[in-house]
Amino acid sequence: MPVKNEFDVIIIGGGITGAGTARDCAMRGLRVLLIERQDIATGATGRNHGLLHSGARYAVKDSESAEECIRENKILRHIAANCVEDTGGLFITLPEDAETGYGLDYQATFLEACNSAGIEARAISPREAIDMEPSVNPTLIGAVVVPDGSVDPFRLCSANVTDAVLHGAKVLAYTEFLDFIREGDTILGVKVLDTRSGEKAEYRAPVTVNAAGIWGHGVAEKAGVHIGMYPAKGALLVFGHRVNNVVINRCRKSADGDILVPGDSVTVIGTTSTKVPFEECDNMEVTPDEVRLLLREGCALCPSLSSTRILRAYAGVRPLVADDSDPTGRSISRGIVCLDHESRDGVKGFVSITGGKLMTYRLMAELATDAVCRKLGVSRSCTTAETPLPGSMDGRIESVSKRFEGKPTAGQKSAAGRQGDMVNKIIFETEADKQLICECENVTLAEIKYAVRELGVRNLQDLRRRTRVGMGTCQGTLCIRKAAKALAEALGQPELAPKLAADYLDERWKGMRAVGWGDTLREMEFMQRVYKYQKPYSYDEV
Ligand SMILES: Cc1cc2nc3c(=O)[nH]c(=O)nc-3n(C[C@H](O)[C@H](O)[C@H](O)COP(=O)(O)OP(=O)(O)OC[C@H]3O[C@@H](n4cnc5c(N)ncnc54)[C@H](O)[C@@H]3O)c2cc1C
């Protein structure tokens, strides 16, 4: 009989690494507790490009990362089909690249490195590249096709958490790790704070896993061990529509603004790389210089970006492990770091898993879970590479045609695309359930109710991460009050609607401020007017 507050393993951090580790541990039969101080995917996991790397980007300099990427790329297409889009990718060479030593000779080196890492890459002519992706810079002098794709990090993280719970894990969001419970050189558990109620609690387990991303540096310090982490900030811009359908990369040494990724209804350009102090990792603002730089480099990949509205800017911090010798962090390996602190530092019952990438999370989780199992004397092997995640068991297209009789509505089709076979749990009982709350992303009232019932949503930010509410072209201008009403009612607290909406807008505003000129500024003015004259908290059209 399990004792309350006792587990086999406690995992700190509900980003993709912690979520994947919780899933793997639970699937191997362990009693798992996952704690996250905010919502899931609020760290680097929710602040990246969403590029499903083929590994080509790392092929020349870091063949180990390149090989890991292509292996995991193939696995994710199978186990996370409803989180991944097979866009394909192009690595283009521009005339100016030839002047800096990254001309067609470099393209040949790049091709060779890709092929020896097992990445299917082939050179095509500039004409073929333009036919494949009409938005690409037409002055290109060379292009290579690679199996890149795009991945929805929120959906992927949520699917891992959902599966962990289905396998018996306990997941506590809005629960902050404060300190360890410790006896001599052994970690016995954690002391935590429920950030909503203010209550403190203690949980015990023979093994604790530090999966706290860049904040893992501070978590490790609390255990008295040092991990040489390198906080590398990256800024990104989201454009108002999907400009390209194929990922466009620059075929040169990694540099600022050289990846353009299409995802759902938008396109994202990134990224920069700057070392920031640990104290700033919680408050990443994008600067005007970063916006200018990303726009300049983005227009080199795709000239039409210069006349495309920017929706917002955001930034994340990569959890890299390295010394201080590289001022940008670009040359630091994206390799995985799994540390058993007993053999490394003499601290028992403590493992850290960090480094890596979103797209190698499953492998990271496997390594961390292997380390946990070794400590617990458990010999069950990992099955996450073969077992599809919830939502991906059935493929997108099949689920929508099987699920709905007759012709599905736009909202039902989009829900099936986002939630995959989990769409079976969305209840379209009445006509009202089918109505669209967010028209940019086709989110229905029924999907909002489902997100509250099944996905642990408590506020509009959580809802955005699970359903894309407010993430499209209007950035919530036309839908956020309707969404606040729907969410507050689904939570059984209709009076909460104004507060939910205000908190959401406050957060969205931060991302718009950095790009507040031209069309974006006009949109911000329009937004203000709409909020002023919109019927408050009604489902009626504006
Ligand atoms: C700008 C940028 C672009 C990127 N682009 C890509 C890409 O295109 N493709 C790709 O594969 N990878 C990409 N990456 C890398 C990828 O995003 C990260 O490697 C990955 O998301 C890290 O996940 P994580 O779970 O280890 O860390 P995080 O996602 O940061 O998760 C750590 C979690 O720990 C929680 N936490 C911290 N302290 C505590 C505490 N005291 N108590 C409880 N919880 C705590 C945090 O709230 C956070 O949710 C990019 C990264 C950046 C920054």
Image: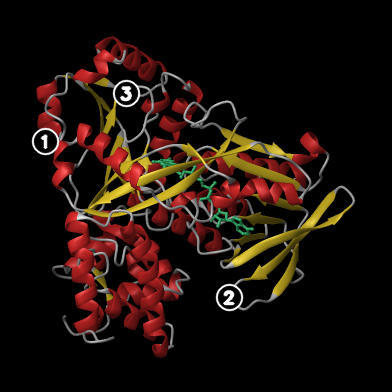
Circle 1 or circle 3, nearest the eye: 1
Instruction: Say which label, 1 or 3, has the lower sequence index.
Output: 3
Residue pointed to by mark 1: 134
Position of the N terminus, as image quadrant, is bottom right
Viewed as shown, does residue 333 lie left or right of 403? right
Describe the element under mark 3 as helix, strand or loop: loop
Viewed as shown, does residue 155 lie left or right of 282? left
Position of the C terminus, as image quadrant, is bottom left
Quadrant hosting residue 189: bottom right
Quadrant hosting residue 54: top left
Describe the element under mark 1 as helix, strand or loop: loop
Can you give x and y, in whole percent of width and height, for residue 359 in the image? 44, 41
Residue pointed to by mark 2: 196
The alpha-carbon separation of the residues under discs 1 and 2 comes to: 49 Å
Residue pointed to by mark 3: 120
Describe the element under mark 2 as helix, strand or loop: loop
Can you give x and y, in whole percent of width and height, for residue 350 in the image? 74, 47
The alpha-carbon separation of the residues under discs 2 and 3 comes to: 49 Å
* Residue type, numbered disc 3: Glu
Instruction: Say if disc 1 is inside 8 Å of ligand 1.
Output: no
Taking depth in this image into account, of 167 and 527 the one nearest to the observer is: 527
Q: Is residue 432 above or below residue 74?
A: below
Q: Residue at x 37, y 53 (%)?
A: 392
Near mark 2 (Cα within 10 A), the count class, few <14, some 14-19 or many ≥20, is few
Q: Residue at x 32, y 59 (%)?
A: 513
* Residue type, numbered disc 2: Arg
Residue 196 visible here: yes
